[in-house]
Amino acid sequence: MWIKKIDDEILNLLHRMKYRAVVVENLDCNKPITRGNIVIVKKIVIETDSRKELKKSLKNIKRERNIVSVKPKSVEASRMAAHDTRVDTIILDENTVYYMDKQQFSLMKQYSKPIEIPLNIFYSSIDSSLKSMIYRRVKYYLYYTKQPLIVSSRASEWYELMNPKIAVLILSQILGIDKRLALSYLT
């Protein structure tokens, strides 16, 4: 489960929802920590629109202790993220959908790079044609690459957290994914 920040209230909710691990974007610590029975890992999200900028950002990251995700804002950055072994996932959302095409998915398949989608895009207030475009890209990615899909909530407040059962239901109903497989896609 990818969340923006963590506090005691969010941690208690995650514990009640039976999460075992979360990745947190705004975390002070650079190594995984454990609170109760929940493992908390730092997530680094890089938003970039050029290859040079991405290389510069990746240069200073200690990958073995962090999860690195890229939100590409250009085709060039998207292709570079697919090639680079320091990148763990590529985020597909309302801002990056335009840079995800057949060639990009082919590269991601070749380099075994998973795509990450925040589930809140399917019930947010973004334009329905944009939701449709994201839906088609995700379906194509799943069908063509046979690579895993990583699903997150992108929560910044406690009320944005998603129960795993609801997330599995959304994946099975909207994307037609088997419930057991959908459970393995949750992060």
Image: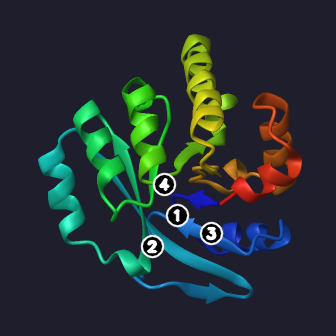
The residue wearing badge 4 is: 112
Who is closer to the viewer here, 47 or 102? 102
Dot placed on the residue nearer the N-terminal end, 2 or 3: 3
Is 57 rendered above or below residue 116? below
Residue 92 image point, x, y percent: 49, 38
Residue sitting at 78 percent across and 49 percent down? 182
User: Mark 3, residues whose alpha carbon is within 10 Å: few (<14), some, or many (≥20)?
Assistant: many
Tag 3 secondary structure:
strand
The residue wearing badge 3 is: 22
Dot placed on the residue nearer the N-terminal end, 1 or 3: 1
Residue 163, quarter of picture: bottom right
- Is 71 left, or right, of 13 in this rendering? left
Please state the total of marks drawn on the protein image.
4
Q: Nearer the viewer, mark 1 or mark 3?
A: 3
Is 74 rendered above or below residue 90? above
The residue wearing badge 2 is: 27
Disc 2 to disc 4, C-alpha distance: 27 Å
Given the image, on which type of amino acid does mark 4 rest?
Answer: Ser
